[in-house]
Image (cartoon, rainbow, N blue to C red):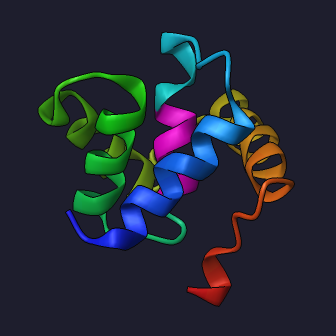
Amino acid sequence: MESHPWRVVALLEAAFPEGLDEGDHLALVGVLCEGMSERNAAHTASVYLGIHEMDALWPAAEASSHVTNRAQRSRISELRNRISAHGWAPDED
């Protein structure tokens, strides 16, 4: 894995030291897809969440294709704000 995703994993660990509920996996991948390819977002999420990469690929495809409902978009926004407070700035990458 290239160094950039490892930096993002470290950022996620700082932003969410207590981890994330399974219900937030899609929202997390949605945030990651704003600054990474689907593949890198899925890989990064799988490393951080401790899940198989294939289990992160479908949320990556769903999130990047914008097939999310209002509640998911709201949660994506909340997670984005929390991650941004720890240095997430996908426009700068």
Q: Which residue is at a point 45% across and 45% down the rendered structure image?
A: 67
- 34 lies above or below 22: below
Q: Is residue 30 magenta?
A: yes
Q: Nearer the viewer, residue 89 or 34?
A: 89
Q: Which residue is at a point 42% across and 34% down the rendered structure image?
A: 48
The quadrant of the image that shows the N terminus is bottom left
Question: Residue 51 placed where, x, y %?
Answer: 26, 22
Judged left or right of residue 50, residue 76 is right
Q: Which residue is at a point 38% across and 62% down the rendered structure image?
A: 5
Question: Residue 40 placed where, x, y %?
Answer: 29, 61
Q: For the view shown, which residue lies furthest in the bottom direction?
A: 92
Majority secondary structure of magenta residues: helix
- 66 lies above or below 79: below
Where are the magenta residues, as a range?
Answer: 26-32
Q: Which residue is at a point 46% across and 44% down the rendered structure image?
A: 29
Q: Is residue 36 magenta?
A: no
The quadrant of the image that shows the C terminus is bottom right
Whether residue 27 is visible, yes or no, is: yes
